[in-house]
Amino acid sequence: MADRDINLEDRVRELEQRLAEAEQARLAAEAEVAALRVELTDTGERERIAVTHTERLLEGLEVLGEARDALPLFAEVLRVLGDVLEFDAAFIVGFAPEVSPQIVAATDPRLRLIAWPGGAFTDRVLAGRPAALLDLADNPEWQQVEPALREEYASALHVPLHALHSQAMLVCLHRRRGFFTPDRVIRARRFAALARQALQTAEHLVDLEVDRDHAVELSRAKSSFVASMSHELRAPLSAIVGYCEYLLADRAAQRDPDLGETLGRIYLSARMLCDLIGNVLDLSKIEAGRMDLHLGPVAAAEVCRLALVTAEPLAVRRANVVRVDIDPDLPELHTDAAKLRQILVNLLASASKFTAAGTIDLVVRPDRRADPPALVFEVRDTGKGLGAAESAAVFLPFSQVGPVDPRRLGGTGLGLTIAKHLTELLGGTIDLASSAGAGTTVTVRLPLAGVH
């Protein structure tokens, strides 16, 4: 009986021991659950803060991306960084060759009074190595800063900001020692990298605007020079043409075939030079927006006749036959007669240049069903034609395409370009249809009522 009582007591103690161990395990589990809940809360808070920082950073970067000048951008960098990285104050030091460092932006106006000394520490930062100072008193460069500005803060973070043409250093300050922990340094480095891209983009845009303005000014100067020189050249050439016409009409030239032939060559060469100079002058006027129009009723058939007289010498030189098909019942056209004549001369001259021993057709017909009703001029040639790439470039200034040598035929490559511009000035359209080996057709459509 006694032995049985002893066994029961042992069993009770064993069960009590197990209960105590179970209670300890329960308490430990509850403590672990509580710790996990705290950790989850901290993690959620960190994630919330990270999301908030990211959203603010993205919003700030959108603003930075719209900046067009470095100095306003520096101030914006400080504003955006204040939403991402906690600090009590911050400033940006700008560096330029042979110039003392300058405070280019600051959250506190007093910080602009800092005369940053520079040195080995600054050189390391500018070389791409951000640095966090746990205590400003330990840094020799900060020891050179005025005590009234230095002693207000305890720790600092220094991050390089490089652009295309400048170097800068971002400095964040805090009143607590050791505030800029490694995670804050990483966050600042990431932001600084994005800010550098925005700064470089801003400087690049400024460079592009400067280059554009310079190019516009050069183009304006070029156009002015070309127009001035064209006027100077046209005056003596016009005199040569006038004297040639007078001498060709003189009876002495008519009695002397050799003299007449010589005068004819001089006259033809002078006329060609006048046309070349006229093309250059016209292009300069078109580019400058100074091409005047003199609109009025025009007899299209008479304009075509005058254009053929001017273009015929080149067609004869190339052994081409020019054929004319003009509708006998043409309606009156309201346009600029001189500009229309120039369009037709340029089209006929271009067709003659790229056609040898072939035919060139000038077809004129009304299109009363068009909206608005129009007069259609077609210049067709039997030349070798143009490929797709050549057709796409044919209206570009100074481009000479096709199988012939432009040095042999001369010209500036402006004829079709000017024809296109003049056609559009007159409210019309110009189209080119061509394929290799099948000739070329250029079609000009001008509204009967003229341009408004």
Image (tube, rainbow, N blue to C red):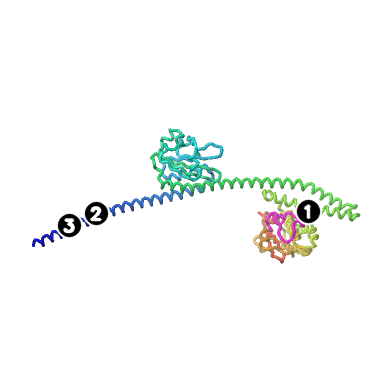
Please provide the residue range marked out in magenta. 394-418
Using the image as rendered, state which of residue 232 and residue 125 is in the foreground: 125
Q: Amino acid type of disc 1?
A: Met
Task: Answer with left or right where residue 147 lies relative to residue 283.
Answer: left
Q: Looking at the picture, how far across and down is residue 353, in whole percent?
A: 75, 59
Tell me which label, 3 or 1, sits earlier in the chain.
Answer: 3
Q: Residue at x 75, y 52 (%)?
A: 276
Residue furthest left in the image: 1
Tag 2: Cα neighbours inside 10 Å, few (<14), some, or many (≥20)?
few
Residue 3: image quadrant is bottom left
Residue mark closest to the camera, 3 vs 1: 3
Q: Looking at the picture, how far across and down is residue 300, in whole percent?
A: 74, 58
Task: Answer with left or right where residue 266 lies relative to residue 449.
Answer: right
Under circle 1, the secondary element is helix
Tag 3: Cα neighbours inside 10 Å, few (<14), some, or many (≥20)?
few
Using the image as rendered, state which of residue 359 and residue 203 is in the foreground: 203
Q: Looking at the picture, how far across and down is residue 299, in whole percent?
A: 75, 58
Q: Amino acid type of disc 2?
A: Leu
Q: Amino acid type of disc 3?
A: Glu
| Residue 2 seen in this snapshot | yes
Is-magenta flag for residue 66? no
Using the image as rendered, state which of residue 344 and residue 222 is in the foreground: 222
Question: Where is mark 3, residue-wise?
Answer: 16
Residue furthest front in the image: 3
Residue furthest bottom in the image: 438
Is-magenta flag for residue 395? yes
Q: Residue at x 49, y 38 (%)?
A: 119
Residue 325: image quadrant is bottom right
Task: Answer with left or right where residue 287 lies relative to residue 194.
Answer: right
Tag 1: Cα neighbours inside 10 Å, few (<14), some, or many (≥20)?
some
Question: Where is mark 2, residue-wise?
Answer: 27
Residue 272 got which mark?
Answer: 1
